[in-house]
Amino acid sequence: MSADRRFDLIIFDWDGTLADSAAQIVTAMQGAIDELQLPSRTDHEIRDLIGLGLNDVLTRLYPELDADEIMQLLISYRDRYLANQPPEAPLFAGALEALEKLNEHQYLLAVATGKSRKGMVRSFKRHERVGQLMASSRTADETASKPDPLMLRELLAELDVPAERALMVGDTEYDTQMAAALGMAVVGVECGVHHGDRLRAAGAEAVIEYVAQLPLWLGHR
C-alpha cells in the first residue's frame, strides 16, 4: 500500500453507480406489484429505495403488510427479475475504463451492494472484466442491508484495510450513511437515484457525475 496517497481501497455500490439499472429495477418491481394486486406505488417511491436490500425496500413500501405478505412479494419479484432473464443492465459510460485505471494505480477494488448474491453473480458473469477487477464483494442477502455498515466492516476486515484508508463510492444516501458510520470517506455520483445535495447532506465530501470521473478526482489523469 502506498503512503503517499489517501486511499488503498475503493468500494463501489453497483446499481446506479457502476450499472445503469434503475429503470429495470423499477419495471420489475411494478410488475411484481401488479401480479399480486397490491396497492400501487409510484415509480419515484420505488426508485428512491434502490440500494437497500429487497426486504427493506418492501417493508418501507408496504409497512402495513405482515411478514408473510412481504415474503410473497419478495419471491414474486425475484422470480420475475431473475428467472425471466431480463437483459443485464449496462455499465455507465466510462465506468470500466475508470476501474481499469484505478487497478493500474494498484488500488484494491470491491463492491458493496443491495443486490442478492445471485444477482451479483449474474452481473459479474455479464460484466466479466469488472468481476475480475474486484478483490471482494458483499451483498445484502449475506450480511446486514444498507445503511447498516456491517458489509463495509466485513470488507475492511477481509482486505485488511483501515476505514481511514478506504473510500466508498455510491449514488444514494444509504451508501453515504453506512460509510459515515465508520468514518469512511464518501464520493457520491449523481448518475443514480439520489440528488447530489442529498448525498452531501448525508456526508459525501464530494459529488461527481459518473464513476468515469473518479480517477481525475483522485488525481490520476
Image (cartoon, grey):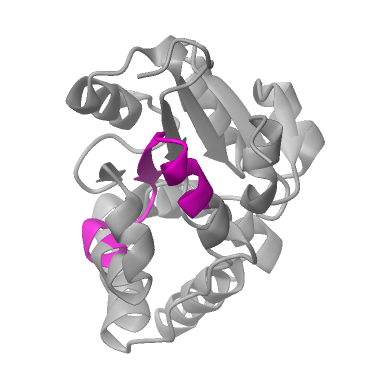
Q: Nearer the viewer, residue 192 or 10?
A: 10
Q: Is residue 34 magenta?
A: no
The tally of labels here is 0
Q: Which residue appears at 57% of the width and 29% of the height? A: 176
Q: Which residue appears at 49% of the width and 46% of the height? A: 60
Residue 216: where, in percent of width, then height?
A: 70, 39
Residue 139: where, in percent of width, then height?
A: 29, 47
Q: Against 169, is 118 above or below?
A: below
Q: Against 148, is 110 above or below?
A: below
Q: Against 49, is 6 above or below?
A: above
Q: Quadrant of the N terminus?
A: top left
Asked which quadrant contains residue 8, the reply is top left
Give left or right: position of 13 versus 81: right
Q: Against 37, is 212 above or below?
A: above
Q: Which residue appears at 64% of the width and 30% of the height? A: 218
Give left or right: position of 146 versus 190: left
Magenta region: which residues?
A: 99-120
Q: Nearer the viewer, residue 195 or 20?
A: 20
Q: Is residue 64 visible?
A: no
Q: Is residue 195 visible?
A: yes
Q: Quadrant of the C terminus?
A: top right
Q: Is residue 106 magenta?
A: yes
Residue 173: where, in percent of width, then height?
A: 61, 34
Asked which quadrant contains residue 206, the reply is top right
Residue 82: where, in percent of width, then height?
A: 30, 78
Question: Which residue is situated farthest in the right direction here?
Answer: 197
Q: Which residue appears at 56% of the width and 70% of the height? A: 26
Asked which quadrant contains residue 160, the reply is top left
